[in-house]
Image: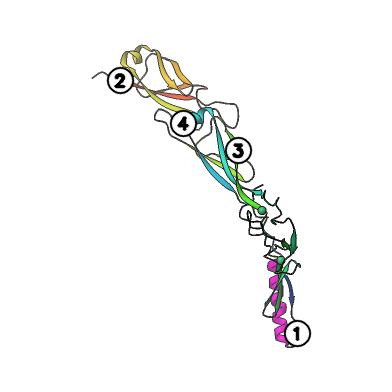
Amino acid sequence: MLALDSPSGYTLSLILSFSLSTSRPLSLILSLILSLILSLILSLPRPLPFAVKVMTTVRLSFMESVKGAKRQLTFPTMHSCSTCSGSGSSTGKTMACPVCKGSGVEHTAMGPFHMQTSCRKCAGTGRVPEKSCTTCHGSGSVKSEETIDVDIPAGIEDGMQLQIDNLRYVTIEVEPSSQFRRKGTNVYSTTHISLPQAVLGGKIHVPGLYGDMAVKVPAGIYSGQRLKLRDRGFPSVHDYTKGAHILELVVDIPS
Ligand SMILES: [Zn+2]
Ligand SMILES: [Zn+2]
């Protein structure tokens, strides 16, 4: 789907033959050793067709990470040239490559070796556009952009990565909150209560991820004590569970 700045499909297929024109045995042995080394190198696995991973970053507010978000993301891509219908030729016709004379291979002499490589001009096809298309400069494809609607799941955490397809990835950044802290799927916050509330208990209202929460404070609270409010934390992106809201109660002592 994505193939960016492909270096004209130039393959490293070298076919080797060595010159037997020399009569000196030493040169022949040297040639044999070199050809063995080269054939070893050439038998190594070839790299996969040229493809580039594209990464992008999306920044979410803290609350967007709770509820999930939608974003339109634009990725670079290659499209078939519309001017020449992808042929690379403004006339639509091709002709024999002037570099390799239509054979698709280039010949290079390297000492006693004779090397044969894919033609760089025509990428080994033997044909080039009769008249290069001015839009795509004969390549048949043009750089373009693709806009994709991306659904970011609720509960996503700072640093997580979303995979759109096998080449496109989105890294998530979440802005910190002045009110809440996150640890796993749990959310932490602090609230102040009065000394009578701490002694007698009662009902308080505190901000939560899903709006204000009415919290029942038991009698006999000490400063720094934590209440665990189940299912008020972040939704997990892995399953249907939710974390807890851990509420720290700070008792205000009158001065
Ligand atoms: Zn050629
Ligand atoms: Zn074109």
Q: Position of residue 51 (x, y in %)?
A: 64, 52
Circle 2 residue: 252
Give me the C-alpha separation between circle 2 and circle 4: 28 Å
User: Helix or strand or loop: what does disc 1 sit on?
Assistant: loop
Label whose residue precedes the other's in the sequence (1 or 2): 1
Label 2 neighbourhood size at 10 Å, few (<14), some (14-19), many (20+)?
Answer: some
Q: Which residues are magenta?
A: 19-43
Q: Which residue is situated farthest in the bottom direction here?
A: 24
Residue shown at 70% from the left, 77% from the top: 113
* Membership of 85 in magenta stretch: no
Residue shown at 39% from the left, 30% from the top: 178
Three-letter residue code for mark 1: Ser
Give me the C-alpha separation between circle 1 and circle 2: 99 Å
Quadrant of the rendered structure where residue 124 is?
bottom right
Q: Which residue is situated farthest in the left direction here?
A: 255
Label whose residue precedes the other's in the sequence (2 or 3): 3
Circle 3 residue: 148
Picture disc at residue 62: 4
Number of the front mark, 1 or 2: 1
Question: Which is more toward the observer, 35 or 230?
Answer: 35
Quadrant of the rendered structure where residue 23 is?
bottom right
Label 1 neighbourhood size at 10 Å, few (<14), some (14-19), many (20+)?
Answer: few
Q: Taking 237 as reference, is 177 left or right? A: left
Picture disc at residue 21: 1
Label whose residue precedes the other's in the sequence (2 or 4): 4
